[in-house]
Amino acid sequence: MAANQSAKKIGRLYSIAGIVVVLFIAFNMVVENLVYLRSRQVYDSNMASVEAMSRMNDTLSDVNENVLLLVAGMESNAGLNILDSIDKEFSTIDTLMQDYEALDHTEIEMRRYRQACYSIHAYERKINEVRDVLPTSGYDVSRSIYTQELAPLQTCATEMLMATVEIGTRNASDNVQRSSLQHGIAQLALMLVTIFGIVALFIAGRRAIQANLNIQQKEEELAEAGERLDNSRRKMYDAAHTNILTGMRNRYALDSYLSRLIGNAQFNLAVFDMDNFRVVNDTYGYEVGDEYLCVVSDRLNEEFGSSGELYNISGNEFCIIFKEEIGDMQAQQLAEQIRQSIGRPATVAGIVLQSPVSASLYHCLPSEGMDVNGLLMKMDSALHQAKRDGGDRLYYIQQ
């Protein structure tokens, strides 16, 4: 009888232990599901934020490309279509802003976002102010308006958007890490109760594996979103540092490269200007002049692309930073060859065109303490002196 009572007592203890195990497992499963659902909601919100900002940045890039088309001098009827596209793109940005604001964000993320909105609206207002001027004012005026008024606003807006996206991506990564930690704690709790039941451990293990797979999938999605952002950033950089007519690197790219070289390396720099290029535009029109510049730029890339970094820093002004291994005498010889190459006859639309070329060459040393603007002003001053002395010559600037 005592044995029966002991057996019953042990049975009751096992029953209680089993119930405790089941309740504990059930409790852990409920907590784990709540953690997972919450982390999924936060993750979905973060991904929606990143996607909205990425699309906003891509649309802003499309706006800038259309503005560059206006600056390049599209025909008036095409210009109207471009202006309509710009209006639609800003309307799309407004919709994306509403979608973004409907989501939950941190305080610092919202501050960055408001700065981005302010920059975008400033960029839109400035475009509206000059939208009727750009298609009709000519390339030089349009380019000046773009570089001095529109480009800084667009660049600021892009940087603020990128900063907002980076904060959102970082928050999403932090949430995923917290979710991983919480799931890890839940798994540890389930492992501690394995002594109360192998079956309970097996069930908890399967759920933990599934949770880890979900987290891994989220991390892969975040990596893909980061790659898309990097591609968008590279496209924006290329567009801002490339001459839209000739495809060569522009003045922004030159400034960026020189800022890294000055004070850290010695190098030879040459600037070239076509003396009578305006006569070509006035006589044959801007389309012929533009094609002439494209022929010259292709010729330079083919003949001297291996000698250094080539730039088209303005309409008819070119520049080369020679490679470090090219000495002073060789740089002078190459500069003269480049000057003559630019001045060789070129056939455009059945017309043989030729323009004399003035040039300046300078050997920059790290110890001079000169900045980018000072160096380029020195080069332009020598270039203008060559033109005043009759043009069609190369001036070597002495130290």
Image (cartoon, rainbow, N blue to C red):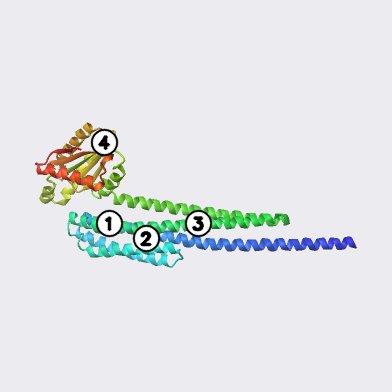
Say which mark, if any, is on residue 151: 1
Q: Position of residue 384 (x, y in %)?
A: 14, 45
203 and 119: which is toward the camera: 119
User: What residue appears at the point 35 percent right and 56 percent down from the top-left corner?
Assistant: 159
Decide which of tag 2 and tag 4 comes sooner along the chain: 2
The quadrant holding residue 294 is top left
Q: Nearer the viewer, residue 104 or 51?
A: 104
Q: Which residue corresponds to mark 4?
A: 307
**Residue ID at (22%, 56%):** 71
Earlier residue among tags 1 and 4:
1
As helix, strand or loop, the secondary structure at mark 2 comes to helix
**Residue 22 horizontal/vertical position (percent):** 70, 62
**What x and y, as percent, mark residue 36?**
56, 60
Of all residues, the one furthest to the right in this rendering is 1
Above or below, 42 against 257 in this view is below
* Numbered label attached to residue 174: 3
Q: Quadrant of the N terminus?
A: bottom right
Residue 366 vertical placement versus 104 (above, below): above
Q: Position of residue 267 (x, y in %)?
A: 26, 38
Residue type pointed to by label 1: Ala
Earlier-in-chain disc, 3 versus 4 = 3
Circle 2 residue: 56
Compare marks 1 and 3 and give the one earlier in the sequence.
Answer: 1
Image quarter hosting the C terminus: top left
Quadrant location of residue 297?
top left
Q: Nearer the viewer, mark 2 or mark 4?
A: 4
Towards the viewer: 239 or 359: 359
User: Closer to the camera: disc 3 or disc 2?
Assistant: 3
- CA–CA distance in space, label 1 to label 3: 34 Å
Q: CA separation, marks 3 and 4?
A: 48 Å
* Amino acid type at image mark 3: Asp
Q: Is residue 213 left or right of residue 233?
A: right
